[in-house]
Amino acid sequence: MTGPVLRKRPIKQAEPTGTLKRKADQANLVATPIRKTGKTSKTSKETGKENKVCHSEDISPMKTQKLEANTTQKATVKPFVTPRTSRSSKPGAVCSYGKSEKGQNEDEVQYAWNLVNNYTHRDIDELLDFAKPATAAGQEAAAQNVDFISDAMERILTKKRLPNGSGLDRRLLQKFANGIDEWMKVGSSLPSEKPLYGYFSNFALFVAQCLKSVAAGNNPHIAHLILPADRSDFKPDDSNDSRRIDVGLALRGIGASVECVSLGSYADTLCVVEAKYSRNLDENALMQLFLYSANLYARQGNRRYLWGLTICADEVYACMMLNDGLFVSPAMRISELAGRKMLISWLVRWSMCPDDLLGYDPTMHRVTVHSDLDVAGSDNDDVDDIRYRIDCYDDESMETIKYVTKRTIMSADDILGRHTRCFVATRYSGSDAYSSATEVVIKDAWPPTNYPPLEDPRDEIKLLRKIHDTFKNNAPDHIYPELIVGGHVRLDQEAVSAIDTTDAIFKVAGVNRIDPPSDSDAESAWKYQPLRAHRRIVMSPVGHSIKTVQNEAELIIVLVEAMQCYSSVLDGCGVLHRDISTNNILVVRDGKDTIPRGLLIDFDFAVKVDTHERSARPERSGTLPYMSIANILNLDTPRTALDDWESLLYVVCWLATVGITSSHRVSDAELEKKPIKNWRIGSPEEIADVKPLFGNGNCSGAYLDDDDDSDKPTDGSIDPLVKRGAHIEAIITDLKKVLDKFKLEALAAL
């Protein structure tokens, strides 16, 4: 197959500047940003319910922070982006406070620009190889189909006869070819982007019609048809904002009619197509593609990665969106034969490759609720319309257990990062109907690792198994996360079951992933991607957001029990949690009117420590607003339990300042007057400046008091608790006593 002549675009040699540069040095990376000396720069954004950091070198811009657009980006006028409506905030997330709708919209747009400028790799010649049939026979058939369709298109466009016996209906194809012919003539720009919607749809329908004719000849390799939506420039029904996508593509069975299909939701969309009226707006198109595609992750719990297309006048780009990088193909110019043939290649390969190469997870099977009968003994309002039957593999027993989800309690709605999802589910019993069986939580995520997946000592599965083995015969008084199934997701590749990793995704294209260089001055390359492993954990009990407590007494009880769990895990299992935050402390109730219990979850950033030393090497980890001062400033001091207890005080400080629930929340205007606002939008240094636990009125009441003030710092530049390292045990013992006292008073008040 003849490929297109590639036109390499000059790549900007820019780095983040100003506030964006500062914020790019704060949190969440798996790889240090690499200076742009080649096609692109390489960084990664770790996501979670709040801004999290994995290692000291794991630093990235945070979506919840106010980002500034890169001042070196192309000097073109940015198109107006329809303002979003308020997105449902994640429970307890700091970003849900103190931000107006307009401010959130600006942050998201600037975040998307940051993706374009610092995470996007352009002109990837090998990108097409990531989407191909699974077998050699299928790949050969795909090449033949591309040649066949390209020849048919050129014959019709030039008014030549189709070959005898082609099986093609010229009348049908001519209808689609008219729009393609118009598209070929638009040049580098046109007055409006709207005609492009129809031009592209005609192109996709032409390819689909040809594939349907090929399939009629008993071609076994065509899996489905790629069809455009029957409306353009529309707001999906399941969107939480007012933004409109230009064109959506959907999968349909090979028996479907070749026509534009009814497509009203992100949940049913294969990929988004973003159009612009000029070739010079290619970066604007990418920005909006990333902005809208995040909704696919939010609405599709079974997406491993995403595809997308941008159209800039007569040029088309394909884009692949992975956890740590965004890959863009060379331009496909529709006015040129090679460009048309390459776009045909993309549509044919997507039609012939298996679902996992379209970015779907074959171990998660979508289930749709059709009636109340699908939900046995359950309040139907508490069951999602779209649910999943999930295969959960256990690394230890090497068995697979099936579960059916009831509802999604956390979605992956960012382009980059771990893509953590959580579901409430029950054991599958041969029917997709939800039953009244014991509920469990399924956590599905792509954490980074520096080890072969099964050898990672920081693997949350290993840590939870250690906790389970320690407590199973000596159950503590408090509740704790009980591991039921824990393992790595496995996919069949070349008739072999393999762990789903970044390496496995790259292997499909015959490309070797390269570990990102530690030298920030190293020349970047798109193959520099961190290793991630796809992990799935089933555990109990099921908890609810800390925002569901009814009053201050319940909050105290929940916090105390969560820290009791923390201490038992540290003392009995040698596991240091390192991420105490509002999102990782849940409320568990045995009944509607019962006294709540506190559950500590999310051991993603936990590490094994010596049970005597009980400290970890200094590295930044946790959720930024609640990190200890030593942690947030990345001071060269060991991380101990005292850092986590300090984080608890910040949790209390935050909730006491902004309110626990929406009914108690302070207004945005009032929050704007308080120094604590910097916890959400400030740099590490700015956050540390307003965090001193001693002698600072920003967190009145959230400080330790004793008779000796000689070692209390006055400038707030370092963590005061670190200076008390020799008294760690005594301080923690006193903290426990204080909490126990508060708990007794809270229980008496209920």
Image (cartoon, helix red, strand yellow):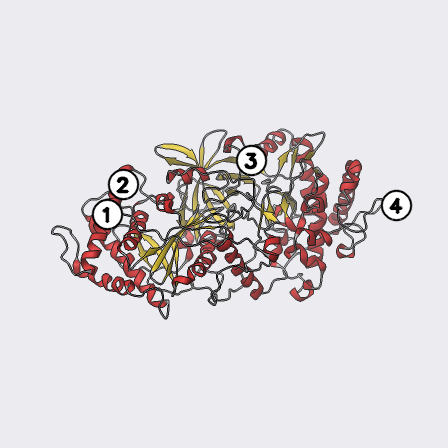
Left or right: where does residue 726 sit relative to residue 489?
right
Question: Label 2, label 1: how many angstroms apart (C-alpha)?
Answer: 10 Å
The residues bearing labels 2 and 3 have C-alpha atoms spaced at a distance of 37 Å
Q: Are marks 4 and 2 in contact (CB under 8 Å)?
A: no
Q: Secondary structure at mark 4?
A: loop
Q: Identity of the amino acid at label 1? A: Asn
The nearer-to-camera label among 1 and 4 is: 1
Instruction: State whether residue 659 appears in this view.
Output: no
Q: CA distance from mark 1 to mark 4?
A: 83 Å
Given contact means CB atoms under 8 Å apart, are the residues at marks 4 and 3 in contact? Answer: no
Q: Which mark is residue 138?
A: 2
Viewer-side label of 2, 3: 2
Label 1 secondary element: helix
- Describe the element under mark 3 as helix, strand or loop: loop
* Nearer-N-terminus badge (4/3): 3
Q: Amino acid at mark 2?
A: Gly
Q: Which residue is mark 3?
A: 459
Q: Earlier in the sequence, mark 1 or mark 4?
A: 1
Residue found at x 30% / y 58%: 334
Of the 4 image quadrants, the one containing the N terminus is: top left
First in residue order: circle 1 vs circle 3: 1
Vertical side of 435 occupied by 317: above or below: below
Q: Amino acid at mark 4?
A: Asp
- Image spot of residue 287 (x, y percent): 47, 58
Marker disc for residue 707: 4
Q: Which residue is mark 1?
A: 145
CA–CA distance in space, label 1 to label 3: 45 Å
In the rendered image, residue 82, in percent from the top left (x then y), is placed at 48, 67
